Image (cartoon, rainbow, N blue to C red):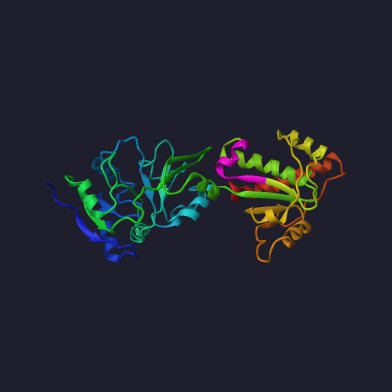
Amino acid sequence: MSPLPEREKAPDAEPARELTQRVAAVLARGGLVAMPTETVYGIAARADLPPALEALRELKGRPEDLGLTWHIGSPSAVESPERLAPPARRLASRYWPGPLTLVVPSVPAGLEGVARDGWIGIRMPAHRATAGILAQLPFPVVLSSANRHGEPPATNADEVETALDGSVLLELLLDGGAAKLSEASSVLRIGRGRFDILREGLIGIDQLRAAAGMRIGFACTGNTCRSPMAEAWARKRIAERLEIGPERLSEFGFVVESMGVHASHGSPPSRLAVQVLKELGVDLAGHRSRAALSRDLAAFDRIYCMTRDQREALALALPPGKTEHIELLDPEGADIPDPIGGTRDDYSQALARIRAAIELRLPEWA
């Protein structure tokens, strides 16, 4: 029997400086460390050091063609827009630290060895000692469940020793007690037209969709020209950003609707609104007007109005302090004039203003 790895206590609290330094020294030279998370125990290796990754795969008997998950100790590691698109950032904000692994199509330089086919898994564990250590390391780290490939993952330090008995590759074992959840994280692939659960866990697909997407509303007066044009164009552009068809927006948690402050129910869109959008490949003919009802307004993440008067009218329909999500569509605060009763040029100009405003808003949405 091979010697057991050296153990260090690592309770679910901020780690001691000496412990962080000890882990850093082992990982820096390519050694492996078992670390607790809130789900299961993981084996940590330096992610930008090929010999360390080879040792990790050898220890687990893990096939070369399977990727490894980059574990971070702070959201700042992925704050740049190139790392996570807005839907993934919303998921991270909602569920990190916690039992969610996001598989995204943005591989940082130096981590190509842990990615597969241009995708990389990222997770921020909720165990404070492990997260605190990861946040202080000057190099990236991957963790893979503490078990032989295909076997159940270890959920306490004793199980780690049992599962990996016979290996001399594991140098250090951090004992954080029993894992609180004792179940692997949910794994979601998100980006490039994909929203796929790769591994089911504690967070269900409906919860993930609700957190990733947005419920966006557009409001004008009668809901027959400006707001339906905005709705239709926003659906097109959000779908293009997600690399899907507009009919799939709900799969990514998006709801895009429009309404009128003084709208009647069921009126068709303006003929000229239909025409100017049709020239851009967008079909508005099936739209029917709906009124902005106070009971529905709070359900939206954002409501964009065409004029200040419309914003004020909607704000009056909600309790004080509950109106922060109602804004003007134009980020610069200008009204978009009503083209109703005007010429085709009036409609084209209104649509151009709407399109420009939506383009400025898109980086927040998708």
Is residue 86 something one can see in this rendering? Answer: no
**Residue 350 within the segment the image draws in magenta:** no
In this orientation, which residue lies closer to the viewer: 15 or 98? 98
Residue name at image x 62 percent, y 49 percent: 215
The secondary structure making up most of the magenta span is helix
In this view, the residue farthest toward the left is: 1
Residue name at image x 57 percent, y 45 percent: 253
Q: Is residue 94 above or below residue 267?
A: below
Quarter of the image for residue 320 reads bottom right
Residue name at image x 71 percent, y 35 percent: 282
Q: Position of residue 63 (x, y in %)?
A: 30, 36
Q: Position of residue 362 (x, y in %)?
A: 62, 47
Is residue 239 something one can see in this rendering? Answer: yes
Image mark count: 0
Q: Position of residue 55 (x, y in %)?
A: 25, 43
Q: What are the residue bounds of the magenta stretch?
A: 246-256
Q: In the drawing, does residue 113 fall left or right of residue 30?
A: right
Q: Position of residue 297 (x, y in %)?
A: 68, 55
Q: In the drawing, does residue 290 fall left or right of residue 127?
A: right
Q: In the drawing, does residue 72 fall left or right of residue 152?
A: right
In this orientation, which residue lies closer to the viewer: 28 or 64? 64
